Amino acid sequence: MENVVQIITVYAIPVLFAITLHEAAHGYVARMFGDNTAFVAGRISLNPLRHIDPIGTVIVPLVMVTLSGFMFGWAKPVPVDFGSLRRPKQDMVWVAGAGPGANLAMAIGWVLFAKLLTLFGVEEEFFYLVANAGVQVNLVFMALNLLPIPPLDGGRIAVGLLPNKLAYQFARIEPYGMFIIIGLLVTGVLGTLLRPFLQLGQSIVAVFL
C-alpha cells in the first residue's frame, strides 16, 4: 500500500498536466480551424477539473496501478464539431494530432525541467522522480493516442488521411474502439503496438538530454 501511495504522489502532477494540456490542445486547434464548440463549452482550459472523467481519470488508473503498476486511463473527450471546421477532413488531422503533439512537447518540457534542477543544484530526489514520471507519462499518452484505432487520435488522423470510401469504412470501427484497446491491453499485445511510437518519442526527447 505504501508503494502505491508513493507512485500516486509522484505521478499525480504529471498525469494531470498530461491530460489537461492534451485535451485543451484539441480544443485550441479546433478553434483555430473554425470550430468554437470546445471554447463555448469551457474546455480550452488549463483547469484539470474541466477535463477529468471520474472513472477514466481516477478510478481506472488507481486500480491499474494497484494491480499491475501500469497506469492506464482517459479524460473526458473535448467536444469537436468536425462539420464546423473549414475543411473538415483535412483539418481533422491537425485537431487530432494536437493532443499527442502536446504530450511530446510536455515530455520535452519535463526533460528541460530536470536539467534546470541540476543547473541550480537541486538535490531533492522527489523532483527528479516527478520529472522522470512526466517524461514517461507523456510519451505513453502520446504513443497510446497515436494508435490508429478510432476514437483515439491516431484513428482520427487515419480517417483524415484515407480516401473517402476507405475513411468512411474505417470510421465505423469507432463504437468498438475502446473494447479493442482493452482487449489489446488484457492480451499483452498493446505494449508491442506502442513500442514504435514510444521509440520515436524517446529519440526526439533524447535530443534535449
Image: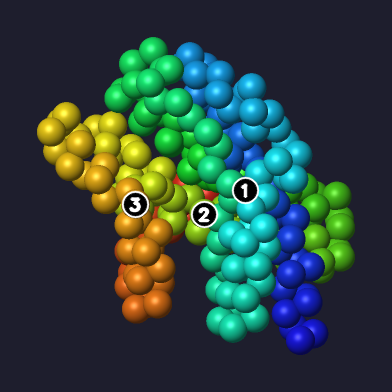
x and y, in percent, of residue 9 in the image? 79, 68
The numbered disc on residue 19 is: 1
Cα–Cα gap, marks 1 and 2: 8 Å
The residue carrying pointer 1 sits among few (fewer than 14), some (14 to 19) or many (20 or more) residues within 10 Å by Cα, namely: many
Q: Nearer the viewer, residue 177 or 3?
A: 177
Asked which secondary structure carries label 3, the reply is helix
Which amino acid type is shown beneath numbered disc 2? Phe
The residue carrying pointer 3 sits among few (fewer than 14), some (14 to 19) or many (20 or more) residues within 10 Å by Cα, namely: few
Cα–Cα gap, marks 2 and 3: 21 Å
| Residue 104 as seen in the image, left or right of residue 59 | left
Give the quarter of the image for residue 36.
top right
Residue that sits furthest to the front in the current view:
175
Labels 1 and 2 touching (C-beta < 8 A): yes
At a point 26% along the width and 42% down the height, the residue shown is: 171
At a point 34% along the width and 21% down the height, the residue shown is: 88
At a point 33% along the width and 63% down the height, the residue shown is: 180
The residue singled out by tag 2 in the image is 141
Which amino acid type is shown beneath numbered disc 3? Pro
Give the quarter of the image for residue 136.
bottom right
The residue carrying pointer 2 sits among few (fewer than 14), some (14 to 19) or many (20 or more) residues within 10 Å by Cα, namely: many
Position of 57 relative to 36 (above/below): below
Asked if one can make out residue 209 in the rendered structure from this viewpoint, the answer is no
x and y, in percent, of residue 141 in the image? 52, 54
The numbered disc on residue 175 is: 3
